[in-house]
Each structure stands twice: as C-alpha cells, then as structure tokens.
Image (spheres, rainbow, N blue to C red):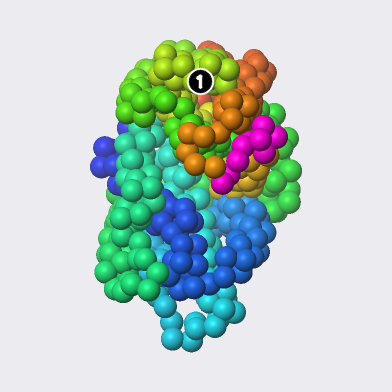
C-alpha cells in the first residue's frame, strides 16, 4: 500500500510555524529578557537569577503536564491544532509585553515580579504551542520518508531561529540609559509577524481524526507507560546525550577560539559543509540502512571526532576535521533523533493501541532539559580544575588551562556519544519486521480515518 503523501505546502508551513515559535523563544530565553531587565531596566542580577531559579521548577514539570493535556483534548480541530491556532495570538501578545516597561515597575521588587510573571506566561504558552507543533509530524504520518522531509524543512528554517538571538539581538538591544523605542518596535513587529505565521499555518495541515476519540490513561499511568517502553529508554539515552553535546559544544567554542590560533572561518566552513552533507546522507540512508544504523554511524563518527579534538584540538588539521564531523553530528541530531522518536511512539501504539505523542514529548523534555544545566556546570568545573583564569586576557592562559578547555569541551561529549553507539545495539525497532509493523500501522490509521469520516458523513 502506498504511503500517504503530505503536501509540500503543509511541510513548509508547519516548519515555518516551528521556526517562528522558536525565534520568539530564543529572543526571550536566549539571554534577551535577562539583558533587558538587568542592563536596561536596572533589575539587580541576583533578583534576575532568582527569577530563573523559581522558573526552573515550573519549567521542569510543565512539559509532561501539557503533553498530557493535549493528548486528552477532544476538539473538532483535533488534539494539537487548537493550541497552535488559538494560542498563537496570545503568545505573540505576551512576547510583545515582555519588552514593555510598565509605569508601576519602578522598584526592584516590581521589576522582579514583572519579569517572573512575563517569563511564566510566555513559557507556558510556548510549551503548549511548541509541544503541539513538535508532535504534528507524528500525527500526520507514520512514514519515515515523509516525516524526514518535514524535518529537512525544519532544519532549513532553523537557521533563522538560531540567528535571532545570536545575530539580531546584539545588533538591536538598547544600551543602558538609551531610548528603547526602536528596539520595542522591532520586537513588536517580530511578535506580530510570528503570531500571524503560526496562526495561518494551522490551515495547511491536519491531524488524524481517529486519535482524538481515544480514551487516554491518567497522568501518572501515562508517564509509567512511557518507561515500560524499552525503546523509549534507549531513545532517552540518545536524546539526553545530544542535548548535552549541543550545549557543551556551543558553550566551549568561544573559549576555544580565544586561546587557540586556529582559523575560525575554516572551522565554521567545515562545520557548515558537514551539516549539509550530513542532512543529505542521512535523508538518503534512513530508508536503506534504517534509523538504527544511521544513528550508529552518526554517534560513532561524532564520538571519534570529539575524542580527537579533546587530545589534538590545537592542531589545524584536527580542528577542521573535528568541526566537519560536528556539523555531521548536529545534522544527525536534528534529523535522525526525531525519526527515532517517531518510531518509539509508533511502537507504543502497537502495544497500547493509543497515540500518545504529547505525553512522550513532555516526558522527553522533562528528562533532557537538565542536560543543559549539567553540561554548563561540568564545563565550568573542569575549567576550574585545570586552573583556567576567568580574569585573564584572551590568549594568555597556561598550557594546562588550554588542555582543560579541550577536555571540558570535547572529552565528555566524546565519551557519551561512544556509549550511545553501543547502546544502539539494544535497539530493536529495525529491519524487515519493524518495517512491516509500520505498514500495518499505516493501514490501520487509514482504515480508522475512513471509518470516522463515514460516521461523520452519515450524521
């Protein structure tokens, strides 16, 4: 039976919406909100740190909570689309209000509460919308080729969401004591445009009708069922590692170039080339080799390059090779990891008969979010052990501190990726038998959809 084809416009609009959702989040949580409140409004850094500490507690539990809520949603539009469509205007409005200096927010505690409330409202809406967008490819099809083409479009659009906090924000952020009107106008424009794209995107894709009628388990049983899925546990090892590695590599790159005389242009060029080749290779290999072998190819080569960089990263040739395979690894993380996640969710349906994308996405975020903090803490701790002087000028660290930069940056990622390579031997969703199950699942979805549509037509 031929797989259901997803229209190109649906793939593009879903990926565009994902990009705009991530762009607003990156501008707020990628340092923009902290800079605005501390540098421009004058909030004490200690109070801003307390805001993030309090918020971190909520941020740890809201993902599985919203995953559970969306799985249990019953609406004519489906389980996910209502949150995307009707949440988009509110999400955009809260984003715009994040950059407003209210007349009452003149004292330290008033600014503290404004920042805390703004962050809570913004991230709550982000979680509801982003979770729904994240699982839409799994709602739309079970075919990995079709899902893979969506993820390629997401990778293309992710260039813009990554550039916003890294490139745009430094160019437009207001200096202390200056007029912030232009900054606010730009942020308002971004909010209105992003909200409009997210809202409009919901008219270009649809969910499977049958899933919204299913009776889902309770919150805690739903979480427990996730961990009964052995493939999910293996996936979490990979997912946690990828988040850790991405965080560590992005954090360490500034320290690396400040101390080692390696051409930045050549390294970044090699990384971009690796990312392009990685996307091309994995998109072709996943339907011939399968997700399992693609994942092993990615983790194995990425691990070896990280270990090489940890011990020989000061050499030009090692740096170029290392950055090339870093690009390949980033491409694999953004392409193969979502495919593996989809297979894990599909397998759950073969066991439970239920589509529980929201709960799986929420539990995954709950587990992987700590990887960001752990990676940052581990990096700084290793630097301190090797005598890195935070007050020293660039290029003046000791030889021991330089070695510490390479170890803190690449050694733990290399070890974790090697572990993932061997863990993947335990992964069973592979081969002809799994392909056959996927085909059966697709046929079941089509039959259930046709049955529901016939019932609706007869009413």
Q: Position of residue 24 (x, y in %)?
A: 39, 57
Q: Position of residue 148 (x, y in %)?
A: 39, 29
Residue 269 drawn above or below residue 73: above
Residue 66 is at least partly visible in this image:
yes
313 vs 6, left or right, is right
Residue 90 is at least partly visible in this image:
no
User: Which quadrant holds the C terminus?
Assistant: bottom left
Q: Is residue 83 magenta?
A: no
Q: Secondary structure at mark 1?
A: loop
Residue ranking furthest to the bottom = 104
Tally of marks? 1
Residue at 54% in and 83% down: 107
Q: Position of residue 158 (x, y in %)?
A: 36, 41
Q: Is residue 388 magenta?
A: yes
Q: Nearer the viewer, residue 102 or 175?
A: 175
Q: Residues within 10 Å of mark 1 (few under 14, many from 20)?
A: many
Q: Main secondary structure of the magenta part?
A: loop
Q: Nearer the viewer, residue 58 or 347?
A: 58
405 vs 324, left or right, is right
Residue at 50% in and 50% down: 131
User: Which quadrant holds the N terminus?
Assistant: top left
Residue at 32% in and 28% down: 265
- Identify the residue position indicated by label 1 in the image: 313
449 vs 58, left or right, is left
Q: Quadrant of residue 157?
A: top left
Q: Position of residue 122 (x, y in %)?
A: 48, 64
Residue at 25% in and 42% down: 9
Q: Which residues make up the magenta segment?
A: 383-391
């Amino acid at each position: 039976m031929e797989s259901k084809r997803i229209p190109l416009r649906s793939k593009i609009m879903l990926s565009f919406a994902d990009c705009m959702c991530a762009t607003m989040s990156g501008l707020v949580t990628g340092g923009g909100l902290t800079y605005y409140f501390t540098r421009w409004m004058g909030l004490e850094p200690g109070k801003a740190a307390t805001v993030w500490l309090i918020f971190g507690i909520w941020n740890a539990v809201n993902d599985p909570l919203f995953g559970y809520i969306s799985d249990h949603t019953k609406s004519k539009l489906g389980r996910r689309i209502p949150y995307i469509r009707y949440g988009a205007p509110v999400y955009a409005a809260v984003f715009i209000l994040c950059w407003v200096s209210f007349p009452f927010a003149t004292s330290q505690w008033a600014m503290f509460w404004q920042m805390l409330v703004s962050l809570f409202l913004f991230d709550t809406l982000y979680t509801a919308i982003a979770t729904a967008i994240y699982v839409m490819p799994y709602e739309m099809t079970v075919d990995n080729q079709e899902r893979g083409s969506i993820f390629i479009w997401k990778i293309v659009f992710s260039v813009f969401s990554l550039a916003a906090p890294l490139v745009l924000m430094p160019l437009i952020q207001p200096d202390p004591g200056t007029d912030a009107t232009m900054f606010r106008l730009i942020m308002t424009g971004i909010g209105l445009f992003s909200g409009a794209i997210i809202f409009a995107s919901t008219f270009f894709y649809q969910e499977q009708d049958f899933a919204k009628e299913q009776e889902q388990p309770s919150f805690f049983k739903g979480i427990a069922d996730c961990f009964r899925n052995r493939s999910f546990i293996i996936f979490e090892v990979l997912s946690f590692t990828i988040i850790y590695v991405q965080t560590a590599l992005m954090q360490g790159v500034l320290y690396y170039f400040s101390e080692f005389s390696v051409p930045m242009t050549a390294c970044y060029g090699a990384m971009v080339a690796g990312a392009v080749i990685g996307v091309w290779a994995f998109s072709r290999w996943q339907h011939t080799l399968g997700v399992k072998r693609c994942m092993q190819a990615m983790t194995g080569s990425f691990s070896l390059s990280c270990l090489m960089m940890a011990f020989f990263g000061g050499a030009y040739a090692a740096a170029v090779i290392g950055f090339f395979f870093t690009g390949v690894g980033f491409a694999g993380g953004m392409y193969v990891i979502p495919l593996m996640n989809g297979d894990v969710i599909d397998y759950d349906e073969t066991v439970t008969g239920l589509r529980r994308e929201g709960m799986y996405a929420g539990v995954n975020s709950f587990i992987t979010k700590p990887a960001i903090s752990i990676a940052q803490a581990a990096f700084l701790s290793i630097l301190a052990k090797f005598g890195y002087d935070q007050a020293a000028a660039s290029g003046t660290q000791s030889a021991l501190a330089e070695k510490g930069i390479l170890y803190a940056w690449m050694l733990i990622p290399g070890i974790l990726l090697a572990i993932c390579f061997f863990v993947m031997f335990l992964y069973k969703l592979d081969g002809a038998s799994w392909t056959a199950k996927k085909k059966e699942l697709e046929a079941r979805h089509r039959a259930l959809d046709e049955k529901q549509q016939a019932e609706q037509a007869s009413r």
